[in-house]
Amino acid sequence: MTHEGAIPSIDLSISQQAAIGRKMSSGLKLGRRVSLVTGAGSGIGRAVAIGLSAAGSRVAIVDIDATKAELVSAEIRKLGGDAAAWATDVADPSSVDRLRSVVRETFGPLDILVNNAAIQVNKTIEDTTPEEWNRQMAVNVGGVFLCSRAFLPDLRQTRGVIINMSSVNGFFVEPSCAGYCATKGAILAFTKALAIDHGREGIRVHAICPGYIDAGLAEGYFESQADPARARAEAGSLHALGRIGRPEEIAKAAVFLASDDASFMTGSAMIVDGGFSAGLPPK
């Protein structure tokens, strides 16, 4: 299933998320470090941006949808955080280059890059068009490449952190999403390669592998079912913890990886899936 995209609302209010984030991040403070989150207009990206802000970071909110990005930025500013929004197509090299310039002009060199933007085509390969395949690859893998490439000079300067949003589908596949699974597997390999190439420059690189999260594309799937509550319960029954995850739980993982508490971690994939990929729990 899906794990990254966008939703208009989640279980907790923005103020509740921020309060939880401040409580949980005591000792994980990011000071005034500059963060950038792609796909931050909603879903996991939105929660990560809020979590980073709650930990003290100044946050660049990036999304292909300018309205959604600005709404999240305004929410963070209303809570006392420092955020600005930019509409960017992460699959477009010129769009990403413009983003790097304007973020540096606004905030200074970047400390934390969260590559979260993604799309999903729920089809078998035979039913997937070349255009759908290419776009999915361009956003999910190409966007990670382009953003990492553009901001590496900043991250080298700040000895910063890259966090790539992969998925349990990078190593634990499900039906009718072969292209999506391929992109998430590629991100895991790319994360390790970046860590090896740039570790001596002080840059740490991580991946997060969410399971079913009640946000984004998964939220859309649940809401499209005849009985959304039952669909959520059935998905939750596949997890050792007996439930699906919340986007703020992914945000807490991102804050930890971005912080100095993870200073001896790089090239790692953090699985945050409630035991989904561990195996089928008992009935």
Image (cartoon, rainbow, N blue to C red):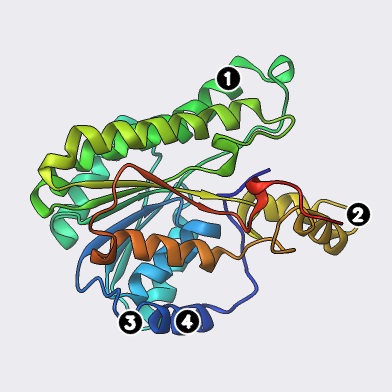
Give the label, 3 or 4, closer to the camera.
Answer: 3
Residue 165 visible in the shown view: yes
Instruction: Please state which amino acid type lies under the numbered disc 3.
Output: Ser
Question: Residue 200: percent from the left, percent from the top?
Answer: 12, 40
* Earlier residue among tags 3 and 4: 4
According to the image, label 2 marks what residue? 226
Please provide percent x and percent y for residue 208.
Answer: 45, 50
The residue sitting at the front extreme is 282
Asked whether the beta carbons under mark 4 and mark 2 sit within 8 Å of each other, the answer is: no
Q: Amino acid at mark 4?
A: Ile
Q: Give the number of the mark in front: 3 or 2.
A: 3
Quarter holding residue 111: bottom left
Q: Determine the CA span between mark 3 and mark 4.
A: 10 Å
Q: Is residue 43 left or right of residue 105?
A: right
Residue occupying image coordinates x 33% and y 82%: 26
Kindly identify the amino acid type of the residue bearing the numbered disc 2.
Answer: Ala
x%, y% of residue 121? 65, 32
Q: Which residue is mark 1?
A: 131
Counting residues from the N terminus, which is met first, the one under dot 1 or under dot 2? 1
Q: Quadrant of residue 195?
A: top left
Say the numbered circle drawn on residue 20.
4
Mark 1: secondary structure: helix
Q: Which residue is mark 3?
A: 26
